[in-house]
């Protein structure tokens, strides 16, 4: 930013011609001061816009961090879905359980819920990785199966 200099008044006009010249110099100086002032204002405005942008980014980041959901792990005897083979395609499909615990958590949107439990059916060991991947992708609950053999599952439900 250029420095403003006071007008030179050493030129004393003895005639109207000299007076006009001094007046022109004063006008030129005044314009220069106005330009300098305008430049300072633009610079200040630019700095304020940079600060505003930085603040908006900070608030946006803070908001994003607040929106991250807290994790909740539910460990139950059964998963909220039951795997079954689709008779036509042979693919593993999942049917949502209608239990009270499942129903109670369906409305909870403030947590990322991971549900751990027995899937309720025996899945051949070779097919478990595929079923596990599909269970992890379930919505609204990511599911992690606990594999039980038929004897353990039967003993749990029918007494040890």
Image (spheres, rainbow, N blue to C red):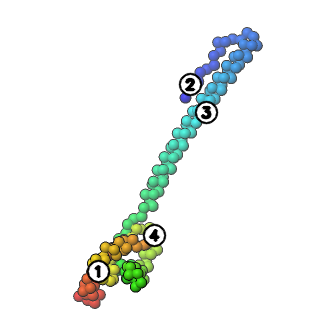
**Mark 1 and mark 2: span between their CA atoms?**
84 Å
| Cα distance between the residues tagged 3 and 2 | 13 Å
Decide which of tag 3 and tag 2 comes sooner along the chain.
2
Q: CA distance from mark 1 to mark 3?
A: 78 Å
For this orientation, the residue located farthest to the bottom is 158
Which quadrant of the figure contains the C terminus?
A: bottom left
Q: Residue at x 60, y 31 (%)?
A: 37
Residue at image x 31%, y 77%?
A: 127
* Identity of the residue drawn at 40% across and 85% down: 87
Q: Residues within 10 Å of mark 2 (few under 14, many from 20)?
A: few
Measure the alpha-carbon separation of dots 1 and 4: 34 Å
Q: Position of residue 8 (x, y in %)?
A: 63, 16
Residue identifier under label 3: 38
* Residue 82 appearing in the image: no
* Residue 45, above or below 111: above
Label 4 Cα crowd, 10 Å radius (few <14 / some 14-19 / many 20+): few
Q: Residue 48's spot in the image, x, y percent? A: 54, 41
Instruction: Report the residue that reaches farthest toward the right.
Output: 16
Number of labelled discs? 4
Task: Give the residue number, with chain letter if any, for mark 4.
Answer: 109
- In-image side of 62 versus 123 (left or right): right
Q: Label 1: how many residues lie within 10 Å, few (<14), some (14-19) or many (20+)? A: few
Q: Position of residue 159 (x, y in %)?
A: 26, 89
Q: Is residue 158 visible?
A: yes
Earlier in the chain: of badge 1 and badge 2, it is 2
Observer-side mark, 1 or 4, equals: 1
Question: Is residue 126 depicted above or below 52 in this figure?
Answer: below
* Tag nearer the camera, 1 or 2: 1
Distance, label 2 to label 4, CA atoms, is 61 Å
Residue 136 versus residue 21 in the image, above or below: below
Name the residue carrying label 1.
124
Left or right of residue 99, residue 160 in this image:
left
């Amino acid at each position: 930013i250029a420095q403003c200099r006071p007008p030179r008044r050493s030129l004393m006009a003895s005639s109207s011609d000299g007076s006009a010249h001094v007046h022109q110099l004063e006008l030129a100086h005044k314009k220069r001061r106005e330009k300098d002032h305008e430049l300072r204002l633009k610079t200040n405005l630019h700095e304020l816009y940079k600060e505003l942008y930085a603040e908006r980014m900070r608030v946006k980041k803070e908001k994003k961090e607040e929106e991250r959901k807290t994790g909740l792990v539910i460990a139950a005897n059964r998963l909220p879905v039951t795997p079954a083979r689709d008779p036509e395609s042979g693919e593993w499909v999942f049917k949502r359980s209608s239990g009270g615990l499942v129903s109670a958590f369906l409305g909870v949107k403030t947590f990322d819920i991971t549900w751990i439990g027995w899937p309720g059916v025996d899945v051949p060991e070779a097919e478990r990785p595929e079923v596990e991947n599909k269970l992890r992708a379930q919505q609204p609950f990511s599911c992690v199966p606990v594999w039980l053999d038929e004897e353990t599952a039967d003993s749990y439900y029918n007494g040890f």
